[in-house]
Amino acid sequence: MDGVFRRGAAIPAALPFVIRLAVCPEVPVRSGLTGLVVVAAELAEPVDPENEHAVRLRGLDADHPERALCRAVLAAHAALVCAR
């Protein structure tokens, strides 16, 4: 993540790895990784283009394709997360 309301383009590629670590009970920093996954999920939420405040803070979805990529990764790994 490269800012409070932004994540870099590498996050969709790294997210599957972070999710797998976050659900592994043997990982000592699991709670921190879980928090990172939650933040990534929050930041992946679509921005309503009618909400000026949200657009100013987070930008338009068209300018941030990583949001949709993160949502796809989270959806693809939902069963793994829910199983834990």
Image (cartoon, rainbow, N blue to C red):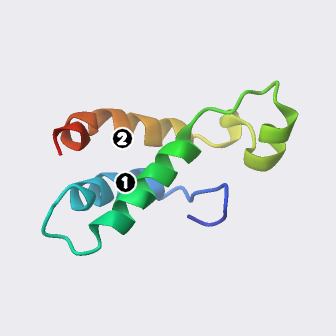
Q: Position of residue 4 (x, y in %)?
A: 67, 62
- Label 1–label 2 contact, CB within 8 A: yes
Q: Which quadrant, please, contains the N terminus?
A: bottom right
User: In the image, what residue type sits under mark 1?
Assistant: Leu
Q: Residues within 10 Å of mark 1 (few under 14, many from 20)?
A: many
Classify residue 5 by image quadrant: bottom right
User: Please, which residue is most extreme toward the right here?
Assistant: 52
Kindly identify the residue that appears in the image at 73 percent across and 46 percent down: 58
Q: Earlier in the sequence, mark 1 or mark 2?
A: 1
Q: Residue at x 57, y 36 (%)?
A: 45
Is residue 23 shown left or right of residue 47? left
The amino acid type of the residue labelled 2 equals: Val
Residue farthest top in this picture: 50
User: In the drawing, does residue 39 fall left or right of residue 30?
Assistant: right
Q: Residue furthest bottom?
A: 28
Q: Residue at x 86, y 34 (%)?
A: 52
Q: Position of residue 61 (x, y in %)?
A: 67, 35
Residue 41: give its label: none
Compute the Cα span from label 1 to label 2: 7 Å
Give the x, y percent position of residue 75: 34, 33
Q: Is residue 53 above or below residue 57?
A: above
Q: Which residue is mark 1?
A: 15
Residue 66 in view: no
**Image mark count:** 2
- Residue 48 occupies quadrant: top right
What element does badge 1 sit on?
helix
- Drawn side of residue 62 relative to residue 75, left or right: right
Q: Is residue 5 visible?
A: yes
* 46 horizontally vs 20: left or right: right
**Mark 2 element type:** helix
According to the picture, the residue beneath numbered tag 2 turns out to be 73
